[in-house]
Amino acid sequence: MTQHQARLAARVFLAIGVTGASAAGAQEYPTRPITFVAAAGTGSAVDLYLRVLVSKFAERTGWQTVVENRPGGNFVPSAVYVLQQPADGHTILQYTAALPILPYSFKAAPFDVLKDFAFIVRNVDLETMLVAHPSIPAKNLKELLAYAKANPGKLTYGGAGANNSTTLTIEHLKLVSGLQAEFVNYKTGTAVIPDLLAGRIDLGATSVGNSLADVRSGKLRAILLLQSARSKVLPDIESTTDAGFPDVDGVGWTGLAAPVKTPRAVIDRLYREMVPALKSAEVRDAYAKVGGIPIWESPDEFRRKVEADMEKWGKVIRDAKLKFE
């Protein structure tokens, strides 16, 4: 064997050794219960999406899991908490569609929404809608626009934080349609509903899951799906395409992420174990009941989605000249 061949062989053996060590680390994982940190309150649609997935995931793998709720603060506290934990795959963040907006709404955020996370899987698209208290005499966007024009300065709408994708979708709709409605800030999406039911605010920007029961009972009225496609859950409600504003599309989503230094072998194993759970009939049916569509975007696809949303919402914020306090 020549000296060159010897060096080449050494590099090959070294590469095999590194790969083997990495694979061994993934095989040993997990060594204790995996904690999934929910970015929303208990009982919300976002919380349900995580719990349903984690339950099926634990059933399939036999691994011990815990779901811990850390809502509020525009999802910053939950993210900070996860980033403070060891980067070993035992603490996982429910990463939401609000985080790509954070660079525009909270410039002092204590983390980078791209650089500080290892993306695992984007697991669900959340259908969203604009709902109204029944006292508002409008059944669709055209009638709502007419009412707002006839009653300038009267309408209010509630949303879960100014840096929430659903809230920004309403602001985008206001920009392109001329709708006049003053924003009222709430801690979570579920917190909007009691004031809306009581008539203390007129409109709500919410996920379908958070207000579906109240719409079906007649306590609230669905005005518009905040997305370009119609919903199988509420097929009679017009989409933004039906209303003439197809570029307004505020489908929310959630995914799973970990601290960026989490070994790639662990990230890949988590992804592989999550996909069959997401493809299961149990997860699909549970998600569908509250306006969710299961997806299983890979870590790299998930990262590209975050980048695309950052560009999309940055443009909306600039065009609408939104200011965040």
Image: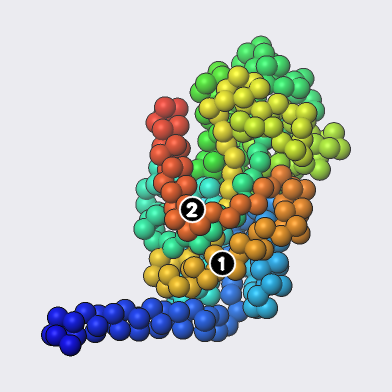
**Neighbourhood count class around disc 2 (C-alpha, 10 Å): few under 14, some 14–19, many 20 upward:** many
Find the residue positioned furthest to the right: 217
* 109 up-or-down from 258: above or below: above
Find the residue positioned furthest to the front: 1
Q: Residue at x 52, y 81 (%)?
A: 27
Q: Quadrant of residue 244?
A: top right
* 125 up-or-down from 80: above or below: above
Q: Amino acid at mark 2?
A: Phe
Q: Amino acid at mark 1?
A: Arg
Q: Nearer the viewer, mark 2 or mark 1?
A: 1
Residue 300 in picture, x, y percent from top left = 44, 56
Residue marked by disc 2: 302
Identify which residue, 181 or 83, lies in the foreground.
83
- Numbered disc 1: secondary structure: helix
Residue marked by disc 1: 272
- Numbered disc 2: secondary structure: helix
Residue 78 in picture, x, y percent from top left = 53, 61
Q: Quadrant of the C terminus?
A: top left
